[in-house]
Amino acid sequence: MQQTQTQPSASQQPIMMQPPQVITTKDHLYLKDQLSWELIAMKKCQHFAQESQDPEIRQAIDKAGQMHQRHYNMLLKHLKHGNRSAMNQVRQLQQQTQPS
Amino acid sequence: MKLNPSPRLSLAGRRSANQAKEASTEMNMNQAQSNQQNQSMNTIQNPKPANEPQVKGPEMNDRDRVNDILALEKYLTDSFNVSAREASHPQLHQNIMTILNETHAMQYELYELMFRKGYYKLEAEDQNKLDQSYQQFMGYTTQFPYSGGHVM
């Protein structure tokens, strides 16, 4: 899935042109935070929309809540597998540098 | 159009009104009067909705609720801005940028709704003052480091 573009440079060292599609420890911490923000946001929106009298306000807040739910799913996907195979690729790539 | 972020909270709106009042004490009556006239002439605000309670109690009303969601969206744009610049790989960064953008759009949509409902009072700046700043910053264009960048 990840096109770990390597530059066949003169030296043995393959270069990753972009950070590989790996969730880092830092990414993970941020993702957990982001998911919590989105969850709270969608709950709050749903709750407030229900309480609102003005239909226009109710609709606007509901729309925001649905957006947060969509965002939650977008972020959640990043936690779903992928790191194992991506890291295998990275390791293979890095082992090529070892012999020299 | 939204002129600057400060009039967006009702408290800030009140503060700027106070500032205007303070400023008028330094002027003579004529100036103060004409200033007040200008102020009403420069005010941009929609009529408030009829169903808004006249005497507000401790309970949350519709206005409080949108205001709170607006604050929530604003807070999220800050938080996602930080996350976006800390993200490692391109796909993750791209996804967070999308979320950041959509959260910004939602924040503005709520602001527009609130403006429509008359919750926001905007104050147009005097063109004279804008002219003054225009002249000032036009003067600085001689400092431009790149050639051919002079705007007219």
Image (cartoon, coloured by chain):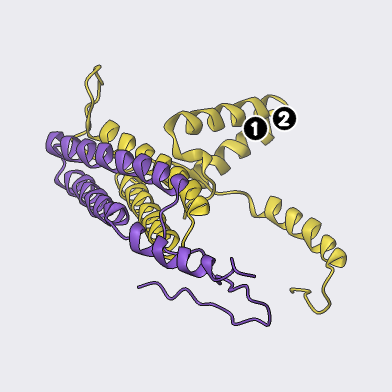
Chain colours: A purple, B yellow
Q: For the point 54% across and 77% down, which residue is it? A: A6
Label 1 and label 2 in one chain: yes
Q: For the point 25% across and 20% down, which residue is it? A: B55
Q: Is residue B102 visible?
A: yes
Q: In this orientation, which residue lies closer to the viewer: B132 or A77?
A: A77
Which chain does the numbered disc 2 sit on?
A: B
Residue A79 horizontal side relative to residue B31, left or right:
left
**Residue B12 image point, x, y percent:** 50, 32
- Check disc 1: other Cα within 10 Å, few if <14, some if 14-19, many if 20+: some
Q: Quadrant of the C terminus of chain B?
A: bottom right
Q: CA distance from mark 1 to mark 2?
A: 6 Å
- Check disc 2: other Cα within 10 Å, few if <14, some if 14-19, many if 20+: few
Element at badge 2? Answer: loop
**Residue B57 image point, x, y percent:** 24, 17
- Is residue B114 positioned above or below B128 on the image? above
Q: For the point 58% across and 74% down, which residue is it? A: A14
Residue type at mark 1: give it.
Ala
Mark 1 and mark 2 in contact? Answer it, CB < 8 Å: yes
> Which mark is first along the chain, 2 or 1?
2
Q: Which residue is label 1 attached to?
A: B32
Residue type at mark 2: give it.
Met
Choose top left, top right, bottom left or bottom right for residue A8.
bottom right
Q: In this orientation, which residue lies closer to the viewer: B26 or B99?
A: B99
**Residue A78 image point, x, y percent:** 32, 56
Q: Which residue is label 2 attached to?
A: B27
Q: For the point 66% across and 29% down, which residue is it? A: B24
- Is residue A58 positioned above or below B23 on the image? below
